[in-house]
Image (spheres, rainbow, N blue to C red):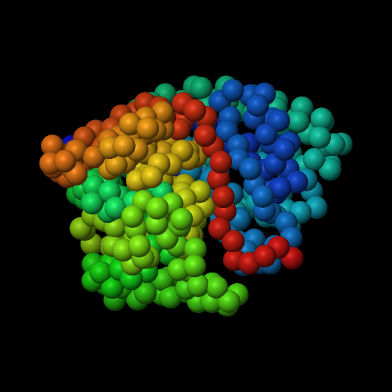
Amino acid sequence: MYCKFAGYKRPDGRVGVRNYVLVLPASVCATDTARIVSQQVQGTVTFHNQNGCSQVPSDQQLTMDIMAGFAANPNIYGTVVISLGCENCQMDLVVKAIQERTNKPIKQVIIQESGGTIKAVEKAVRYAREMVIEASMVQREEFDISHLIVGTNCGGSDPTSGLASNPVVGDLSDRLVDLGSTSILSETTEFIGAEHILARRAKNEEVRNRIFEIVHRYEKALQLVGEEVREGNPSPGNKAGGLTTLEEKSLGCIHKGGHREINAVYDYAKQIDEKGLVIMDTPGNDFSSVAGMVAGGCQVVVFTTGRGNVMGNPICPVIKLTGNKLTYEKMEDNMDFNASPVIYGQKTIEELGKELLDLTIEVANGKQTKSEALGFMEIAIARVCNYV
């Protein structure tokens, strides 16, 4: 089976499914300025960066990796970086981190050196408009599906997630891997209790050890501040939906990874360069997990939910599906795909997996997801510790 999609070729060799200009705030102090700029230039996207300053080095590195990864994501044509000027994430550090990942266009605006917000906005708007015009000249070309990196995530889970929607995504993952693409399994906290099952599918001993390492590291990080992961996971919504333990949730979560061999384990927001099924070490928090995979380079996210979820992402289209018939009916404004026929014996997992692959290709070709049409674009960034 040979599958193709129409995408945008980037100078670094990667292929995007969207063609945005990113207005990137280097810190919380530049976030409002970036928002004002983006509101004035159609074809740009931005995000609320709550970090970028008052961080210890390891915590700051997560923020740097997100910023560099967002700019390098193939759905981005080029980036206008805006900084205040005195934050920890200095402009030269941010630009260097971006350039280490990609050679796409980049412009810089420092608010303090520009003479304040209004002058900085004026300068950044001009840069962004010029870049959007340049981006409009890039035409879609036909590419093999092997150029796709698809992130998988789940949120607001209930028993139908593990019984229907996650297995359907697992079938999609297997199909993508067999076609030479990359599929990302995320949410480390939701491997707990099932990590040994994933480890048996590791490509080699190194990958196997890494699976155990990221799970144990996550648990220990919470224990250092006197907390236990099970105090916050499953969530109240998970429990109301019928999930009783974290292990039960994990056994449902890992179905998104299908059945193929696990080729690599990546730290949060690191650039993904491996084909096949890979794992990224992300939180169970939906917004920060998806942000990590987008920074890693995925062009499309497939997101399952049982109770219902409304999230999107500014850079990457998010396809949302549910295996809960009632949720699909109640939240059709937010749901892109109905996996509940599995529950009622109307369709098989394999049949729906093929339909989901078709939808993924349609989205890669430009079809808007519900979250894109609604303009949902909030993100979160994983944290190591409190602000200093």
> Percent x, y for residue 187?
41, 59
Residue 293 visible in the picture = no
Is the residue 332 above or below the residue 285 in the image?
above
* Quadrant of the rendered image containing residue 113: top right
Is the residue 101 above or below the residue 108 in the image?
below
> Percent x, y for residue 36?
71, 30
Task: Indicate left or right for 6 with 86 as reference.
Answer: left
Q: Front-most of 206 and 246? A: 246
Residue visible at 50% across and 72% down in the picture:
228
Residue at far right of view? 115
Q: Quadrant of the N terminus?
A: top left
> Percent x, y for residue 10?
45, 37
Q: What number of labels is visible?
A: 0
> Percent x, y for residue 274?
34, 56
Residue visible at 12% across and 41% down in the picture:
345
Task: Indicate left or right for 176 with 122 as reference.
Answer: left
Task: Indicate left or right for 160 with 50 as reference.
Answer: left
Q: Front-most of 17 and 30? A: 30
Residue visible at 52% across and 29% down in the picture:
375
Residue visible at 50% across and 48% down in the picture:
287
Q: Quadrant of the C terminus?
A: bottom right
Residue 181 visible in the picture = yes
Is the residue 5 above or below the residue 380 in the image?
above
